Amino acid sequence: MHVADLERDTDPWTLAGSPLAPEVGPRPRIELALHTALTAPSPGNAQPWRWFAGGELIELYRDPARACSRCDPAGQATVLACGAALGALRVALRALGLDEQTALLPGGHPDLLARVAVGGRASPLPEEQWLYQAAPKRRTYRGVMAQGPLSRALSRRLGAMVDGTGAELHVVEDMARKQAIGAAVEAAIAGELPAAAAARVAAGEPGVSFEAPDGAQARGPAIADGAPAFVVVSTADDDPAEWLRAGQALMRVLLRARVDHAWGSFLHLPLTDAAGRKRLANLVGGTGHAQALVRLGGGADSPPTPRRPLSEVLLAQRPG
Ligand SMILES: Cc1cc2nc3c(=O)[nH]c(=O)nc-3n(C[C@H](O)[C@H](O)[C@H](O)COP(=O)(O)O)c2cc1C
């Protein structure tokens, strides 16, 4: 059996971000990039993706069986998570020295989200290697964050993470705007219909977005107090192509945060519907639609949340 076949059953966390010897050919590089993509975050850790890899083409499919129609009616969070996995894949391909061209929603199958054509060898930039190496260290951190602003270096570098992705980034550190965001999160928690809340919990998404110092779920003013910074990823329009763009941008932001020893956690409830996405963009002074809201700051390591191995998500052939 080929080494890559054995590795397909290996925990993606143990392979993600690893180096490869210069003489190794493109196929093991592509497989390693796929393992790295599997460490992306997803709502309730649903991992709503399937992959097809043939020759030097990689295709990303949404897995509708792993979407929560009740808690994510338009499928925005599912596609955003697939976009995050695509972002991790592309970072990994480049860090492993492979050039790529990616088409979003190329058509031909309703669940086909992206087609990545891997090209020749390319020399990675140091930053691409740092982001790749950060992949196995990323976690959603729901504990109490160290108080104080983000490091100046991180605040400066985050903006560059969305360059060329088609998404916009808003880093919010001033208390008045953090309080406005915290109020929007609180309103979404308080207004969640019991049936939607039950579906979310059943889908594995914890009610706790993050903990306040007293150990309870942060509510009310504690939401802004517990966030050294909020980061909002927004897009001009609000459709699946934009969700994929935002997901890729978000993944790069979360990886960059880890390079600079910061952690992130999600507050997605206010973004469940189109009106909420518009409202949050307005709150941060954007004209478009907010697609992701995360809290960034200092935290501590914890064990990774389990992932399905590549053998479970790699399709033997394209879906019919
Ligand atoms: C689109 C999206 C929405 C999410 N929403 C929430 C949320 O509202 N609350 C929360 O605590 N975690 C949320 N998460 C984080 C997931 O629960 C987390 O990614 C998953 O459990 C895997 O854990 P990991 O990120 O540590 O690998 C969200 C993740 C994504 C991608």
Image: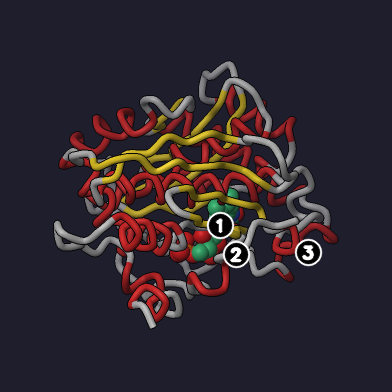
Find numbered disc 1 in the image and state the secondary structure of the residue it sits on.
strand
For image coordinates 56% across by 38% down, the residue present is 244
How far apart in space, not on screen, are marks 3 and 1 (Cα)?
A: 30 Å
- In the rendered image, residue 119, in percent from the top left (x then y), is placed at 35, 40
How far apart in space, not on screen, are marks 2 and 3 (Cα)?
A: 28 Å
Residue located beneath label 3 in the image = 199
* 147 vs 314: above or below: above
Out of 6 and 250, give the one closest to the viewer: 6
How far apart in space, not on screen, are marks 2 and 1 (Cα)?
A: 5 Å
Q: Nearer the viewer, mark 2 or mark 3?
A: 2
Q: Colour scheme used in the picture?
A: secondary structure
Out of 147 and 319, give the one closest to the viewer: 319
Residue located beneath label 2 in the image = 315
Out of 167 and 272, give the one closest to the viewer: 167
Ligand 1 in which quarter: bottom right
Residue located beneath label 1 in the image = 52
Q: Closer to the N terminus: mark 2 or mark 3? A: 3
CB under 8 Å between discs 2 and 3: no
Left of 188 or right of it: where is 9? left
The amino acid type of the residue labelled 1 equals Phe
For image coordinates 49% across by 70% down, the residue present is 310
CB under 8 Å between discs 2 and 1: yes
Left of 6 or right of it: where is 148? left
- How crowded is the residue under tag 1: few (<14 C-alpha within 10 Å), some, or many (20+)? some
Q: Closer to the N terminus: mark 3 or mark 1? A: 1
Residue 49 sits in which quadrant? bottom right
Find numbered disc 3 in the image and state the secondary structure of the residue it sits on.
helix
Find numbered disc 2 in the image and state the secondary structure of the residue it sits on.
loop
